[in-house]
Amino acid sequence: MFMLFYLIFYVACIVLDVMVETGGIIAMVYALVMLVPSVSLAARRLHDMSRSGWWQLLVLIPLIGPIVLIVFLVQDSHDANGFGVNPKLAAQ
């Protein structure tokens, strides 16, 4: 849900930039403001799979890194790990 709303608001910022002709400043400010929540959300998702948040640095490896990180982020959580229980199991 976070990424859905992030994308919707980002597109809205781009449209606003085009209408006001600010040269992309509004979208850039929005992206910078949302950088910390995005990184923390990805770290939390990696913790659900017993991986450290430092795995996000894979993005720095050209071509292969972002693909591997996306695969890590879409995998299902383990039952329990060093960071706590599976959130899906706790909801039941």
Image (cartoon, rainbow, N blue to C red):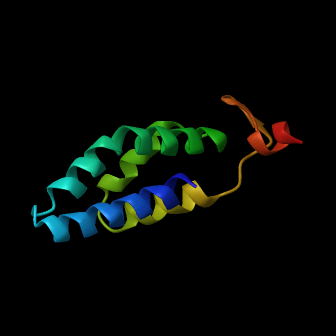
Placement of the C terminus among the 4 image quadrants = top right
Residue 32: quarter of image: top left
Q: Residue at x 51, y 42 (%)?
A: 41
The percent coordinates of residue 38 (x first, y second) are: 42, 45
Q: Residue at x 65, y 58 (%)?
A: 75
* Residue sitting at the far right: 92
Q: Nearer the viewer, residue 46 or 34?
A: 34
Q: Is residue 75 above or below residue 45?
A: below
The percent coordinates of residue 57 (x first, y second) are: 37, 46
Q: Is residue 37 above or below residue 67?
A: above
Horizontal relation, residue 21 to residue 67: left or right: left
Residue 11: quarter of image: bottom left
Horizontal relation, residue 84 to residue 12: left or right: right
* Residue sitting at the far front: 20
Q: Nearer the viewer, residue 37 or 54?
A: 37
Tally of numbered tags: 0
Horizontal relation, residue 1 to residue 82: left or right: left
Placement of the N terminus among the 4 image quadrants = bottom right
The percent coordinates of residue 37 (x first, y second) are: 43, 40
The percent coordinates of residue 77 (x first, y second) are: 71, 48
Horizontal relation, residue 43 to residue 23: left or right: right
Residue 10: quarter of image: bottom left
Q: Nearer the viewer, residue 39 or 32?
A: 32
Q: Is residue 90 above or below residue 42?
A: above
Q: Residue at x 83, y 36 (%)?
A: 90
Q: Residue at x 52, y 52 (%)?
A: 2
